[in-house]
Amino acid sequence: MSIYYRGILFLVVTAFLGEGIEILVNMILARQLGSHGLGLYMSILPTILLIILISSFELPVSISKFIAEREERYHRNIMYHAITITIIFTSLLFVVGTVLLPFIPIFNSYHPYVRWLVIILIPVISFTSVARGYFMGRQQMGKIAISNFLRKIFQLAGLFVLFRFFEFNPESSLLIAIATLIGSEIVVFLYLVFMFIIQFKELRRQPFSNLNRKIVRKNLMAVSIPTTGMRLFTAFTNAVQPFIIKAALVHSGITAVQATEQFGMLMGVAISIGFFPGFIAHSLMIVLIPAVSKTHSERDFSSLQRMLQQVIILTLGYGIVAVTIFFFFAPELASLFFKSGTSATYLQLLWPFFLFHYFVIPLQAFMIGLDLIKEAFIHIIWSTVISFSLILVLGSMSEWRMDGVIIGMNTGSVLLALMHYFTVCKKIGVSVFTGRVVHQ
């Protein structure tokens, strides 16, 4: 368990630095792009993240889970098969992406180069995912933490230098912002693949045993396919969400430009600030997936119960502190981006969304490690349907507008966290309300 706690600590520290950099990145974007440009950036970002998700095929999750559950002598063979699968998958996806992306209408509002920058991401993300999954499975969280930090620092440096010393028109500024984001993924690719090649050479010198190719493929696909489906649904809904929110606001009686500006303040300011403490939750998730998988494969339910209790206490501790600060210091925090009280109000109203979001992430890691991916997917579907329904109904009312949108977002987050928690408790034998063990 010591490697488990060291991994969490290292990831949390580096993620804290990375999130601090992310705030600086969003401040630069807000000031350079303006409210409308930031709205456009935040509108295209979910689509880019959707492409990243498809390209990764959730290999970090499936490989890390399989590596953690198997003895070290099988790792070399597992990685051979994983790389083979990745080459085939990436080649097919690259061809499909090259053919289809030019016809996706969402890119019509952006510089033509944006499409081709996104296509470059496909092989970059796919092979980065293989290396990331291996290091996660071996509990080598230092390399994961460094790669995450490199991504943020490169993006910040690129934006600062380009916007500080050069002048761009609004369209070119938006292109630079997107190009810098994609460039940071290339930096991560170069680092992780280089480290993986070094470690793989060492692995080839050690004794190894073979696993049947069908067994490896079946185990990887058994996690990658449903997890990708779950993430794909989430990414798709995130990509659709900007249009649903803006459509609801326009229907309530405001102009399309006003709706885009309000959405920019919601996602670029309030959500950026509120998600800042989420680096702790994401650090927990990275460590928990292989840790829970290994512990569950050993049928050690007492350790699983203890891990869940520790995660709940830790999340409750930092979560309450975070949302309290957001509520009482919202104007000061929001003013770092825009001199507008609107985004501060959004930040205050979204406190349930943020608090329960911090719980959702580590609980989802438990769901994956406990082979409850199907159940997690169903939970996400239900929470999204209810959240979007409320956004459309309440956000379209002239008396509610963005307040109605926020109610829908809060409801979805609370519902998802509770469904995950109840299911995990039932699986490992913990009382839902007291957290005490009810059976072994």
Image (cartoon, helix red, strand yellow):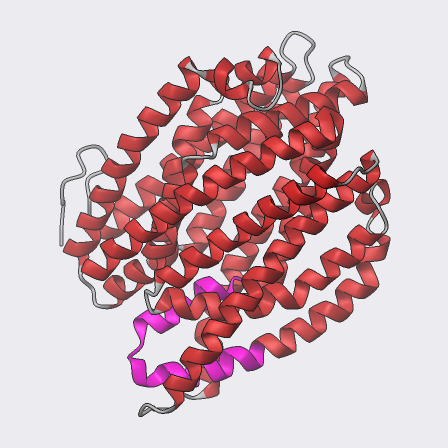
Foreground of the two, 71 or 375: 71
As drawn, 412 above or below 400: below
Residue shown at 66% from the left, 29% from the top: 30
Please state the extent of the stretch shown in magenta in the rendering: 58-85
Q: Is residue 346 magenta?
A: no
Residue shown at 51% from the left, 73% from the top: 194
Q: Position of residue 61 (x, y in %)?
A: 44, 62
As drawn, 190 above or below 203: above
Quarter holding residue 95: bottom right
Foreground of the two, 121 or 316: 121
**Relative side of 104 to 46, left or right:** right
The image quadrant where one finds the N terminus is: bottom left
**Relative side of 171 to 352, left or right:** right
- Residue at the limit of the structure toward the top, as seen here: 399
Quarter holding residue 122: bottom right
Instruction: Decide if residue 57 is in sight here.
Output: no
The image quadrant where one finds the C terminus is: bottom left
Q: Position of residue 364 (x, y in %)?
A: 40, 48
Q: Main secondary structure of the magenta part?
A: helix
As drawn, 52 above or below 138: above
Q: Position of residue 92 (x, y in %)?
A: 71, 73
Residue shown at 63% from the left, 66% from the top: 124
Q: Is residue 81 magenta?
A: yes
Residue shown at 57% from the left, 65% from the top: 189
Q: Position of residue 214 (x, y in %)?
A: 48, 84
Instruction: Decide if residue 54 is in sight here.
Output: yes
Foreground of the two, 332 or 270: 332
**Relative side of 250 to 427, left or right:** right
Count of marks placed on residues: 0
